[in-house]
């Protein structure tokens, strides 16, 4: 006890208080950072989900528009053919999206994939029609 005096005790108390304060600040900062990161990730996920839903709706709307235009084209071809050949029976023109045409040639794909590829890569749609 001779070696411990008031100055040493006071110094130890200050050091312990300093270590405790640093630990408390670290823990509090860590919790706040985790909360903010979780909020940002949730907001990002919601924005991504909204973008996917909007993109899907746009593709479906465009596909409906293309199908409507194909039907109009089929009707026009049928009307034109009926005028030229009044004695032939009314055959229907049936068209479908076969794929896209790029620098590498024609690539077969589903109608949805073809519309997406044509929109993204600015390729031409390949439409096959038959009587």
Image: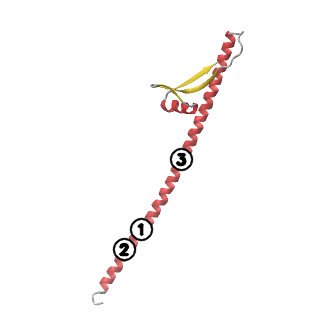
In which quadrant will I find the C terminus? top right
Q: Is residue 2 above or below residue 41?
A: below
66 vs 25, left or right, is: right
Q: In the rendering, at what x and y percent does residue 34 appear? A: 47, 60
Residue indicated by mark 2: 18
Q: In the rendering, at what x and y percent does residue 54 appear? A: 57, 40
Counting other residues with Cα less than 10 Å from the Cα at mark 3, is it few (<14), some (14-19), or many (20 or more)?
Answer: few
Q: Residue at x 52, y 29 (%)?
A: 118
Residue indicated by mark 1: 25
Query: Which image quadrant is residue 126 in?
Result: top right
Front in this rendered view, residue 91 or 86: 91
74 vs 26, left or right, is: right
Q: Earlier in the sequence, mark 1 or mark 2?
A: 2
Counting other residues with Cα less than 10 Å from the Cα at mark 2, is it few (<14), some (14-19), or many (20 or more)?
Answer: few
State if disc 3 and disc 2 touch (CB < 8 Å).
Answer: no
Counting other residues with Cα less than 10 Å from the Cα at mark 1, is it few (<14), some (14-19), or many (20 or more)?
Answer: few
Front in this rendered view, residue 12 or 49: 49
Real-space CA distance between mark 1 and mark 2, rounded to the nearest whole angstrom: 11 Å
Q: Which mark is residue 47?
A: 3
Q: In the rendering, at what x and y percent does residue 63 appear? A: 60, 31
130 vs 122, left or right, is: right
Q: Earlier in the sequence, mark 1 or mark 3?
A: 1
Q: Is residue 22 above or below residue 41?
A: below
């Amino acid at each position: 006890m001779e070696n411990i005096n008031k100055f040493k005790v006071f110094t130890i108390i200050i050091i312990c208080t300093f270590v405790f304060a640093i630990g408390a600040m670290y823990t509090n900062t860590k919790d706040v950072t985790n909360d903010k990161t979780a909020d940002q990730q949730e907001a990002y996920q919601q924005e991504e989900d909204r973008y996917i839903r909007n993109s899907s709706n746009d593709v479906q709307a465009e596909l409906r528009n293309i199908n409507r235009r194909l039907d109009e084209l089929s009707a026009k071809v049928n009307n034109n053919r009926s005028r030229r050949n009044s004695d032939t029976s009314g055959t229907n023109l049936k068209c479908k999206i076969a794929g896209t045409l790029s620098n590498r040639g024609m690539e077969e794909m589903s109608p949805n994939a073809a519309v997406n590829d044509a929109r993204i890569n600015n390729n031409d749609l390949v439409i096959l029609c038959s009587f």
